[in-house]
Amino acid sequence: MTSPTPQEISYLTADIVVVGGGPAGSAAAIELSRAGRSVIVLDKAKFPRNKCCGDGLTTLALRELDTLGLDPGAITDWFDVNAATVRSPSGRQVKLPMPPDGRYVAVAPRLQLDDALLQLARKEGADVRDGHGFTGLSDHGDHIVVDADGLCISTRYVIAADGMWSAVRKAVGLREPGYLGEWHGFRQYGHNVTGPAKDQLFVWFEPDLLPGYAWSFPLPGGRVNIGFGVLRDGERRVQDMKQQWADLLQRPHLVEALGTGFELEDRHAAWPIPARIDQATLTSGRVLLAGDAAMATDVMTGEGIGQALLSGRLAAKAIVAAGALQPKYAADSYKADVRHHLLADHKMSALLGRVLTKSWGARGSIRVVDASGGWGKRNFARWMFEDEPRAIMLTPRRWHRGFLSRSGAYA
């Protein structure tokens, strides 16, 4: 493949270039466009494109989507979850009802969710250039020149939202050789679900997965996103995970939840999940990193859509507040906001994850929830699905009117 000649390159300018059209990049582009900034979004893929993911949306993610103004009706296979069932390593099952006031948990295929978010960014005025992969950048002090397939863009800031293997992070010298993330996810779609998993979300804390878990997330038409996630320990190989997947699907409690006649679709997919926001470098000059590029994933569950949306929006707000000529203020403001919103919860989740590493920790936690009655189960569900930051009780500066009692998203 030959490189384009100078005559074949489009030379553009923008206030901000966002690299990556996933949730973090779209959230940033929407926020910036609404603030009157000119934004170009780059992504090497053409949308709609699939993304390997569990597809689950926590309350944090739903509140962020609500703030951005995304209409769930724009997503064909959106599924609101009204109850979740968790199973301890001992076999104890507890059904957790969701509060009735608003949305607390939902499932939305990334193929549709990411495309809907990018369409919203377009609607708000962002110049979306999907099919144009980032190839490099050069820092000129008061501006950055970004190179992409067939494009050369002069800009004041770059938001890197290009995922776990961020090319922008490498371009600014922040590459981490050998890093494969903290979690490893493994999932497949299935159909003809006739058991309770048709309508309910299931989380199975299997003894051989701890502190990981298996899941089944419902989708319309008797379909599910089903899979498992495990912490990387340096010993599990992908080949072993394939065998473990086949074994999991034959366990009686999974078979019972899915019902007779359940069938898998297509092939399974696996992906690495970064979760070390406490160690990540978030900025480099006029470049701000967000989402998986900033390793902003819940270290306890591996869930990252909410963190991606939040970090993308925070990066945009920091740039808007700083203006074109104050890159240090933008970087410092962004880092302070990430600390405020995510760092304490990361530490709390890491601590709880160590408890769940042990079978007795998972058994004891679910036993306590089971004995707590309706109020306890509802509030455990809210805590589990990030209705409020995990460490909010220990960080009074984040208390707000009605915390622990406010309605869900889209109320």
Image (cartoon, rainbow, N blue to C red):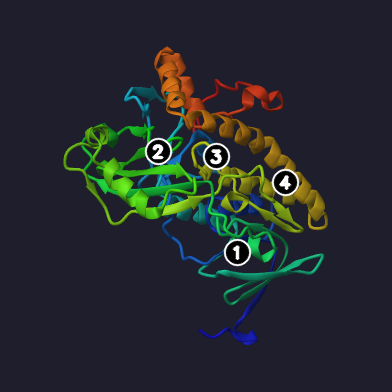
User: Which mark lies nearer to you, 1 or 3?
Assistant: 3
Q: Position of residue 37 (x, y in %)?
A: 69, 56
Looking at the image, is 6 positioned above or below residue 346?
below
- Cβ–Cβ below 8 Å for labels 3 and 2? no
Query: Circle 2 sits on which residue?
Result: 209
The amino acid on which the numbered mark 3 sits, given as a three-letter code, is Val
The amino acid on which the numbered mark 2 sits, given as a three-letter code, is Leu
Q: Position of residue 288 (x, y in %)?
A: 69, 54
Query: Circle 1 sits on which residue?
Result: 167
Q: Viewed as shown, does residue 360 lie left or right of 339? A: left
Mark 2 Cα-neighbour bin, 10 Å: few <14, some 14–19, many ≥20 = some
Mark 4 Cα-neighbour bin, 10 Å: few <14, some 14–19, many ≥20 = many
The amino acid on which the numbered mark 4 sits, given as a three-letter code, is Tyr
What residue appears at the point 44 percent right and 16 percent down from the top-left corner?
368
Query: Circle 4 sits on which residue?
Result: 334
Q: Earlier in the sequence, mark 1 or mark 2?
A: 1
Q: Which mark is residue 299?
A: 3
